Image (cartoon, rainbow, N blue to C red):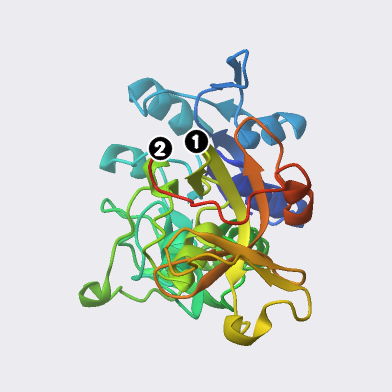
Amino acid sequence: MLKIVYAGSPEISAVLLKGLVDLNCVHIAAVLTNVPAPVGRSKTPQPTPVAAFARERGLEVLEPEKLDASVRERIAELKPDLLVCFAYGKIFGPKFLALFPKGGINLHPSLLPKYRGCAPVPAAILAGETKTGISVQRLALEMDCGDILAQREIPLTGTETAAEVLSNAVVMSIPLVAEVIGQIEKGCEKAVVQDSSKACYCKTLVKTDALMDWTRSAEQLCAQVRALQPWPGTYTYANGSKLYIHKACVYTGNLESADGKEGCVLCSDDRRVPGKVIGTDKNCGILIQTGSGVLAVQVLQRETKKAVHWKDFLNGCRNFVGTLCTNELP
């Protein structure tokens, strides 16, 4: 059984670590994770989910700020065979990788060489892809450029959030990563060099990506809402404050003939202004005009309030139909 150092930090990485431990297919020599970070209003430093799980299972936890000589010395003492990484957040240098006789592998939630980088699932959703996937690759000095050891496709229907896709991807990855580790132990892994001519990189998500531009199409805004869940989310401005939109879809009803029928009620004034709340549909939610098409919103949240179903929202904001949503404060 290979002796492994596992590197990761967030909850999704803890899911993979737990899966590997529960399969009892590896010996985890130590877990490498980020330093505790301030959480909540108190800003009390909390260990990463990977660290918390590892300590529950009695595993050694290393939480260095830098992968310096002291860290390399401790790992060398453990005499590990293989490094397994998923969502760790630091780049491994040649001195560090040299500590592992069988090298290192990394789980990446995309069909490499597409969407190299730190936010591949949101990137795939924003691009309107009909499929994404998971790749197990050799760790290389350049980010996400290592040889592919295994891949699996994940179909996208156009309704999933990034959180849902990533959660499913990690569950799917557990037996795949275990299989690759077994192949490496036997020396029968099959590596495929990435075609760099087909490579593309995804951008790092920032808070400003959350702001909705109503001149864009309903399809683009729907993808934005789904791609940026759970972080950074999506919001607009309405009635002088932020309004967060958590769930939405493209409205496919016929507005020209729907008013007053089957629970669709539209406002009487000009409805062709992007960002205008033009009405409601009892089956679809609050209807907002976009640059092309209509977005139907089902779950939303006023600033400082809790997220609620659209009907509950309207109960507390009865004159919301006719409101103009904007991408800046008036």
List x then y, in percent, for residue 115. 36, 65
Mark 2: give few (<14), some (14-19) or many (20+) Cα within 10 Å.
Answer: few
Q: Is residue 175 left or right of residue 81?
A: right
Q: Tell whether label 1 touches label 2 (CB within 8 Å).
A: yes
Query: Which image quarter is the C terminus in?
Result: top left
**Measured from the top left, where is residue 306 in percent x and y?**
71, 37
Please tell me whether mark 1 sits on a helix, a strand or a loop: loop
The answer to whether residue 182 shows anywhere in this view is no
74 and 221: which one is in front?
221
The image's mark for residue 240 is 1
The one nearer the camera, 299 or 104, is 299
Residue 259 percent across, percent down from the top left: 67, 78
**Residue placed at 48% from the left, 51% from the top?**
325
Residue ID for mark 2: 329
Q: Which image quadrant is residue 47 in? A: top right
Which amino acid does the dot numbered 2 rest on? Leu
Residue 131 drawn above or below residue 227: below
- The outermost residue toward the front is 268
